[in-house]
Amino acid sequence: MKEINGFSKLTKTEKIDWIVQAYFQGNSSVAETLTKYWNTDAQLQKLHDEFIENTISNFYLPLGIAPNFIIDGEVKAMPMAIEESSVVAAAANAAKFWSQRGGFKTTILGTEKIGQVHFIFKGDYAKLSNFVASIQPLFYEATDSITKNMRARGGGISKIELRDMTDKIPNYYQLHASFETKNSMGANFINSCLETFASVLKEQAQLYAGFSVEEKELDVVMSILSNYVPNCVVRAEVSCKIEELASKEITNPRKFAEKFIQAIRIAEVAPFRAVTHNKGIMNGVDAVVIATGNDFRAIEAGVHAYASKDGEYSSLSHAAIDGDSFRFWLDLPLALGTVGGLTTLHPMVKFSLELLGNPSAEELMRIIAVAGLAQNFAAVKSLTTTGIQQGHMRMHIMNILNQMNATDNERAKVVEHFRDKTVSHSGVVEFVEALRK
Ligand code: MEV
C-alpha cells in the first residue's frame, strides 16, 4: 500500500519503516541511510525535525566560503550553501579579481514591500473609491497593535491604494498596500495587516450608507503579500579602467571588455540566453540567500518577474564602456530578512550572519547582489574566453571520483594527471580504470 492515513501521527522511526516497506520493498539499507543523516546531538536534531512537518532525516548542502569580497570598502567572506561544484570557486575568483580593482560598490534603490487584498465588488467604482478613502484611518487603527513594534523600528504601512482591475476580470479590485519592514522579511507582518484590512473592508462595506444591498456584499477573495518587489531593489556594480582588466587570462583587455559587453547585450535581447545568464546570477544569490536562512523561492519568483518587467524576459545585469572605463552592474529586487524566521534558530544561518557581521536587511541586500554580480562576472568571463567547461569539469572531478569510490591515492593521481589537461567524464573514468588494472 503506497497510501496512508495519519502519516503525520507516526513517530520518525515509524515513518521511515512505513516508507521503506511501501516504497523500497523493505530494503533496510534505505532506513540506514536515512538515520545515518540524523544528527548525533538529539537536541539539534529535534530543532531540525520541527522546522517542518513529517521530517524523516536531514538533507545536506555543503556550506562553502568565498573570501576576499570588498563591498563598499569592507572586506567580507561570503557564506554559500550550494551543491554545484564550480560556484564557490568562481565567486572566490571574481572576488579576488575585483578586490584588486577597487572592489564592489552598492546602492539601495528602494526597500518597499507590497501586499494585496483581492476582492470582488459589484457596483459603482466612484462609490467604491469614496468608500475606501473614507475608511483609510480604520485600516491603520485596526492594525495598530500589529504595527506598533514595526513603527517603533521605523517601518510600518506606507500606503493603501484602491486599484481597479475590472479590465482584466469583471468586478475585480485590489487594495494594493506598501510596507516598510526594516530588518524582517515581513511576510507574517504584511499578511497579518492584509487580513485585518480585509476584515475592515468587509465589515465597513456592510455599514456604508452609500452602498446598495448588492454593493454591501463586497467579497474578499484573498489577502496575501506579493513576492514581486520592483521597488525593493539594490544595485551592485564594479568599474575600472579598461587597461586594468588585464590579468593572467585577460591579455587584451579592450577586446575582452568588448566581447564581454557583447555577451551582456545578447542576454539583454535574447530570452533563451537571458534565462541561463540570470541563472548564473542566481547561483551566487541563492547560495547566500540559503546560507542566511532566507526564502529562496520568494527571491527567485521576484527576481524573474523583475527580469520581465519591460514586457520581455531580459538580462538582470548590464555593462558599458564609457571612454576608457569598463562598468558592469546589476539591479536586483531582494526582499530579505536578518531577524525572525530561521535567523536565530538554524546554527548554520546564525554562523553565516555572524560571519557577515550581523548585517541589517539592507546590508544583506548589498552583499547578496554582489554575490550575484560576482558569479555573473565569473561565468561571462569564462564563457567569452576559455569556455565554461574547463573550470566546470575541473571542479566536477571530485564528483566523478566519488561516483567511482576512488581511493585517496587514485584521487591524488587523477588531480595530478589532469592538472594541465582538458577534463572529461570519460577521460577521468578511463584514467581511473587504467590505474586499477
Ligand atoms: C551554470 O550553472 C551557470 C552558467 O550557465 C551561467 C551562464 O551561462 O552565464 C555558466
Image (cartoon, grey):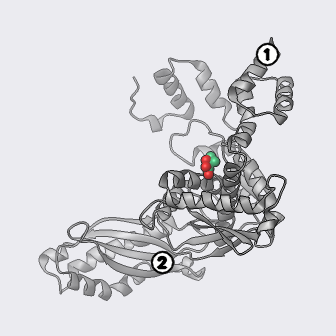
Q: Position of residue 177 (x, y in %)?
A: 41, 76
Above or below residue 202? Residue 396 is above
Above or below residue 201? Residue 274 is above
Which amino acid type corresponds to the residue marked 2 in the rendered image? Ser
* Residue name at image x 13 percent, y 80 percent: 212
Check disc 2: other Cα within 10 Å, few if <14, some if 14-19, many if 20+.
few
Residue 437's image quarter? top right
Q: Is residue 248 visible?
A: yes
Above or below residue 86? Residue 362 is below
Q: Which residue is mark 2?
A: 145
Viewer-side residue, 17 vs 245: 245
The answer to whether the residues at label 2 and label 1 have Cβ atoms under 8 Å apart is no
Q: Would residue 421 appear left or right of 304 to someone viewing this image? A: right
Residue 223's image quarter? bottom left
Q: Would residue 50 appear left or right of 209 to someone viewing this image? A: right
Q: Is mark 1 within 8 Å of ligand 1?
A: no
Above or below residue 391? Residue 16 is above
Which label was assigned to residue 21?
none
Q: Would residue 401 appear left or right of 179 to someone viewing this image? A: right
Image label count: 2
Q: Would residue 179 appear left or right of 369 to someone viewing this image? A: left
Q: Which residue is mark 1?
A: 434
* Residue name at image x 47 percent, y 70 percent: 190
